[in-house]
Image (cartoon, helix red, strand yellow):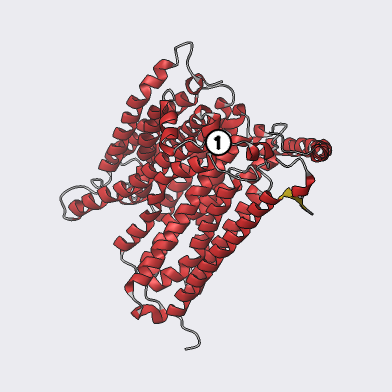
Amino acid sequence: MSDNDLDKVWPTGLTLKEAEEVHSYLIDGTRVFGVIALLAHILVAVSTPWLG
Amino acid sequence: MECVSPVARRHATLGQWSMSRIRRFSVNKIAGMGTRFLPFADVASENVPLSRLLRLSMFQVTVGMALVLLVGTLNRVMIVELKVSATLVGVMISLPLVFAPLRMLIGFKSDTHRSALGLRRVPYIIKGTMLQFGGFAVMPFALLVLSGYGESYDAPIWLGHGSAALAFLLVGAGLHMVQTVGLALATDLVPEEDHPNVVGLMYVMLLVGMIVSAVVFGKLLDNYSPGRLIQCIQGAAVITIVLNGIALWKQEAMDRVRACTVVKQPKFGESIAKLMQGNGTIRLLVLIGLGTAGFGMSDVVLEPYGGQVLAMTVGETTWLTAIMAGGGLFGFALASYTLSRGASPVRLATFGVICGVVAFLSIIWSAHLLAAGLFMVAVLLAGFGGGLFSHGTLTATMRSAPRDQIGLSLGAWGAVQATSAGLAVVIGGIIRDVFNGASAAGLSAASLPYVPVFALEVALLLAALIAVLPLLKEKTRPDAPEIYAGE
């Protein structure tokens, strides 16, 4: 598949596909963290409201 | 099908050469130090040093911590401090049980995971860790809203119930995922003859995680305040991410060959059918289910039994847990020792079940004699038998797992084990409560609520013995497959 080095991205030396997969973990993680943080903020605001 | 460039391969060999010298040096150092203090140091094989296995087994510490928080600490905090009704607490705590059967699916998914990096286990461990973290991060606020703390007394009821349920579900899903795939990774990494030691290590780390976190959270929550609750649970969330991160760091190797090979994806149902065709697989699972339920049912009744029937003090009854854990540790150590020297795991598990039958019969008998000493010895024996049983059955599962179905096999083990352990605790609690009512009405002696639980345990263990008999008979056949033959 990738005997040619054109497909690789540096500095990691991963192929594009591999780099994209690593990136997708980062994106998924950020989304999950975002939703969790949002939910936690709503719950805190319900029990001890701020700006109110 | 060649994916690795010649340059990369040369780099890799150079790296391996210098790494292997350093590694051999450090392995010799650590193995020389560790074997003196740890019973499971034999695992340090040339390719996977003990330090790495110890590091990997840290995911079991977080699993143990999550289990203790869900079943023990938060159970008490919700009822005593947050004044949530016991029924609601019971429902919330048994919610993670819903995910136990899904372990098979998780294991199967990780076996057949398509990844450009050729990874199978690490993505799922990361996902599981994220879920567990997320659940813990939301949980304290969800519990506070559930109990109507602060301004939330007039919040809609579905918000508290829904978010608490979601938090428990997230933690449950996360811990089942981490444990299933983590064990599959450990099985991948270690050659077959070292499996008993890995199993021993994993169980000891689970026990360590449970005991340490029970003590620490108990101390921290002694003077309860809402702020302290938030600190504790969110602290657990951070510890989960940190320990699991350390555990899986650089454990699974990138596999460009696997990433390039295109294989036909088997269907879930076909895979299960293939696994179940394995000789004795179903009997082994039945043994695991019955035995786990048999050993686990007394968890909720041991301490009140000691207190009410045998008139032991509170201090003495808290020792019961320690005695049982000590017996379990001894069982794990003995199982690791004998299994790595060629004993048959199924036979060892059977011996554990027999120990359990004797132990629970003597616990019932001790009520007649009112002998606290006999009771303590019996509890020790029950812990020991339970240790042998858990170790033997997990080792048998690992040994009999086909190389391409390791995740699914361990998923099946986990599904059966977690489901029956959870159901056993629930059923044990129900039996105790039902007979408690009868005994409170003055119908009979104080021992009435407990004896049926122990009797049911004996019955379950005897049923497990009957289930395992054919497996033991096949041992005598010369062409007996791996799980009966041992090494």
Q: Judge from the rendering whether residue B38 lies leftward or rightward of residue B387; answer left or right.
A: right
* Residue B405 visible in this rendered orientation of the protein: yes
Pointer 1 chain: B
Dot 1 lies on which element?
helix
Answer above or below: position of B340 versus B49. above
Q: Position of residue B135 (x, y in %)?
A: 48, 61
Mark 1 burial class by Cα count in 10 Å: few <14, some 14-19, many 20+: many
Residue at image x 34%, y 26%?
B467
User: On the image, which quarter does residue B295 sit in?
Assistant: top left
Q: Amino acid at mark 1?
A: Val
Q: Which is nearer the eye, B424 or A48? A: A48
Residue shown at 43%/46% (left/top)?
B320
**Which of the pair B232/B48 is nearer the observer?**
B48
Q: Which residue is mark 1?
A: B199
Q: Give x and y (percent) for residue B392.
A: 48, 30
Given residues B268 and B2, the one toward you in this image is B2
Q: Is residue B355 visible?
A: no
x%, y% of residue B185? 59, 40
Q: Quadrant location of the N terminus of chain B?
A: top right
| Residue closest to the far top | B478
The correct choice, above or below, for B409 with respect to B222 in the image is above
Q: State the residue lying farthest toward the bottom.
A: A52
Residue B373, quarter of the rendered image? top left
Quadrant of the image occupied by residue B374 = top left
